[in-house]
Amino acid sequence: MKNDLIIFHISHLVTLSGENALRCGKDMRNIEIIKNGYVVIKDGIIEEVSSGEGYQEYITEKTQLVDGSGLLMLPGFVDSHTHLVHGGSREHELKMKLEGYSYLEILNQGGGILNTVKGTKAASFNELYEKAKKSLDIMLTHGVTTVEAKSGYGLELDTEVKQLEVAKALSKNHPIDIVSTFMGAHALPSEYRNNKAEYLKKVIEMLPIIKANDLADYCDVFCEEGVFSLEESELILSSAKRLGFKLKIHADEMVALGGATLACKLGCTSADHLMATPDEEIKCLAKHKVVANLLPATSFNLNKAYARGRVMIDNGCGVSLSSDYNPGSCPSENLQFVMQLACLKMKLLPEEVITAVTINGACAVNKEEQIGSIEVGKYADLVLFAVPNLEYLIYHFGVNHVKDVYKRGELVVSNQQTVYREEK
Ligand code: NIG
Ligand code: FE
């Protein structure tokens, strides 16, 4: 039994209260900010949310009291697109990038994803576990309490399973909850270069094994020029759908191939990247309530155009924002930087940015009933920020504003503090 907890006198308590559903278009601005708020937590679940002094009637001798004066509270962030578990790193690609090689050129020369495939195959379960755990710790200290993690650096059954088992073990042992996605169709392994049909067959054969061992809830495909075509993506995703997987798709990251329309046709939970998505397909995403999962730190790192988040919201889309943390196109776990980029480069309002990483992020992993807002009955996944107001969180960019993080009512990050003594 966990201790009861009350956080009171919170200067700005952002609840995101409302329907447990994707917030679209103008609704993304309605986040509800309570001044001088409090949250009562019992057994890791939120029992009451209000303002003023009413919290006092909930105090018992077991209650832990936390003063939230001068702080901003948000629901724990959901990072709904990451490639968390992988071996090695790719800093050597930096020079190639500076020399003008594109992401796809590096991949087609056997580098990029295929390089990380080698590193992931070579790494033991424990090595992958420890490396991913470090990244999860960074995410947690930046306010993330739920993460989606994809496989896709094995491209054969054993290594795909190894990645997904690492994610499963971490979800059990680490404060962050992990939602897993199978992404066998992330790249074409070199040995299948002349026989793509055979590899597609292999991926389809892996699906029932992944399902039977309960290793992933979602299936994802890299639908991209020179990677997997629209037809190949449909083949994989529709096979996965028949087996009961929920679906995601990497769509329009470099070239518009119709991936967003395919997401609507197949009922994908989210379509991700969308940097090159044309107007008609944006409207299609809005109509079908497919989450538009945008990853601006990838645009930043690849020096590419940003997804048209402003246009998407103005056309009624429900947008979420994620890190895309991976060793190639986005080697950073910092979701606060992603939020700042979304505001500064995509022209999202701070309120829309908050919706995108909380309730809409929860929708991108179908967990909107449990997380994504600070409301009675939801998990007490709560983050306290040492900032005077919401705008400040975006305005003062590139640094970590988190003070404390609670996962299901348990303090898991406390007071980021230096340890030197000031000479005066
Ligand atoms: O989302 N685009 C495909 N997958 C990742 C990159 C993976 C990698 O480069 O290792 C992405 O950008
Ligand atoms: Fe990705």
Image (cartoon, grey):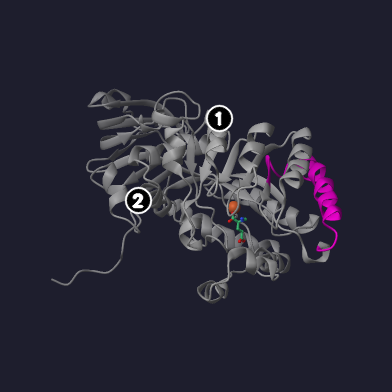
Q: Is residue 370 left or right of residue 242?
A: left
Residue 394: x and y in percent read 32, 49
Where ligand 1 lies, by quadrant? bottom right
Considering the image in quadrants, where does the C terminus appear?
A: bottom left
Query: What residue sits 39% from the left and 52% below the top?
Result: 341
Q: Is residue 152 left or right of residue 31?
A: right
**Amino acid type, label 1:** Lys
**Residue assigned mark 1:** 289
Where is residue 83, by image quadrant?
bottom right
Q: Is residue 131 left or right of residue 161?
A: left
Mark 1 near ligand 2 (CB under 8 Å)? no
- Could you say which is closer to the camera, residue 405 or residue 110? 110
Residue 31: x and y in percent read 35, 31
Where is residue 25, by image quadrant?
top left
Q: CA distance from mark 2 to mark 1?
A: 25 Å
Range of the magenta residues? 193-220
Q: Is residue 38 above or below residue 146?
A: above
SS class of the residue under badge 1? loop
**Residue assigned mark 2:** 344
**Amino acid type, label 2:** Leu
Q: Is residue 154 left or right of residue 308?
A: right
> Looking at the image, can residue 190 be seen?
yes
Q: Is residue 87 above or below residue 15?
A: below
Badge 2: residue crowd in 10 Å (few <14, some 14–19, many ≥20) = some
Counting the numbered discs, the total is: 2
Give yes or no for residue 212 being in the magenta stretch: yes
Residue 309: x and y in percent read 45, 43
Q: Which secondary structure dominates the residues rendered in magenta?
A: helix
SS class of the residue under badge 2? helix
